[in-house]
Amino acid sequence: MLPRRKFLRLTGATIATLTANELFAAFPAKQIKAVGLQLFTIPQMVADDLNGTLQILASIGYREIEFFGPYPFSLPEIIEGWKPIAAQLGISQNAFYGHSAKEVKKMLDDHRMKAPSVHIDINDLRKNLEPAMENFALLGAQYVAIPSLRTEEKKTLDDYKRLAEEFSQLGEKLAKQGMMFAYHNHGFEHVPISGQIPLDILLRNTDPTHVKFELDIFWMKAAGAEPIDYLKNYPGRFKLMHLKDASESVRFAGDGGSPDQWMALFPKITDPGAGIFDIKGIVSQAVRSGVEHFYVEHDLSKDPMLTLKRSFEFLSAI
């Protein structure tokens, strides 16, 4: 916030005499243009009342959201596989929570919000691409992100090289629909295999024109890697970011490759700015490295309204 004395000195006729550079220094541009929210922060709220929840988010100041699947058009086996987790979370409906993509788009428009990106299971893109693209086009999504990988597909370096090739192919298909493929890190990609880091394999072996990445800073830190280093080393590759903080230093008990390991760290997640991470430094580097969309993600927040308000206040002030 601008100090009161400085503000008074800049009011009235004085402000008209300042150069453009002096004005920029006095009133610096916000680094995050539109604070977003990954809906996994508040799954029960959106499942119970999507439109009402969007209204609350808009009233706080959020302008972007990111959906997580599965969706009504998802493969039956994906929907069935999600049911045990959904039951634990208290979610009775899949995204779009009883509405069509067209109806959801109208809700977003009514509240002056957008959904620039969505999460989807990779098998839906492999076997169910047409209905997925049809729905996401109606929604106005730009990025289609894979949130994780299946255990059987991430065991060897050759697995990751095959995935890199497939990501590029999927990216080409999405590009024809005006969308971009993205991959979201979850921690296990930093466990070395034969001396190489799998995430680096994906970054170096995918087509940068068609494949981008979503950097989750919490899971990367829990894996022992540094978000700022990755942003510096791979400029232009990370276009989306999940922002959450940690109440204390975090590391996975194992390789970070299973939901039980992720959920074990949920209690250590806190709102951006309320923990030990250098959120401001990460955001500054992210902007310089080309990140376009920033989402609050406090997995299963125990106090949703506090998280929503506190996170927005902190990030909108950066």
Image: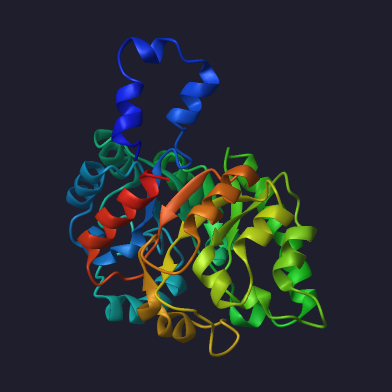
**Left or right: 65 as drawn, with respect to 206:** left
Coloring scheme of the render? rainbow
Marks counted in the figure total 0
Q: Residue at x 39, y 73 (%)?
A: 269
**Left or right: 264 as drawn, with respect to 157:** left
**Can you give x and y, in whole percent of width and height, for residue 70 in the image?**
41, 64
Q: Residue at x 25, y 42 (%)?
A: 58
Nearest the viewer among 154 and 226 is 226
> Is any atom of residue 238 visible in this view?
yes
Q: Residue at x 76, y 68 (%)?
A: 162
Nearest the viewer among 1 and 111 is 1
For the C terminus, the image quarter is top left
Q: Quick one: which residue is furthest to the right in this view?
A: 194
* Quarter-of-image position of residue 266: bottom left
* Quarter-of-image position of residue 138: top left
> Is any atom of residue 65 visible in this view?
no
* Quarter-of-image position of residue 71: bottom left
**Can you give x and y, in whole percent of width and height, for residue 7 in the image?**
32, 28
**Left or right: 28 as drawn, with respect to 108:** right
Is 266 drawn above or below residue 203 in the view shown? below
**Can you give x and y, in whole percent of width and height, for residue 106 in the image?**
28, 37
For the N terminus, the image quarter is top left
Nearest the viewer among 208 and 11 is 11
Is 153 drawn above or below residue 216 in the view shown? below
**Can you give x and y, in whole percent of width and height, for residue 226 in the image?**
63, 67
Q: Residue at x 57, y 42 (%)?
A: 179
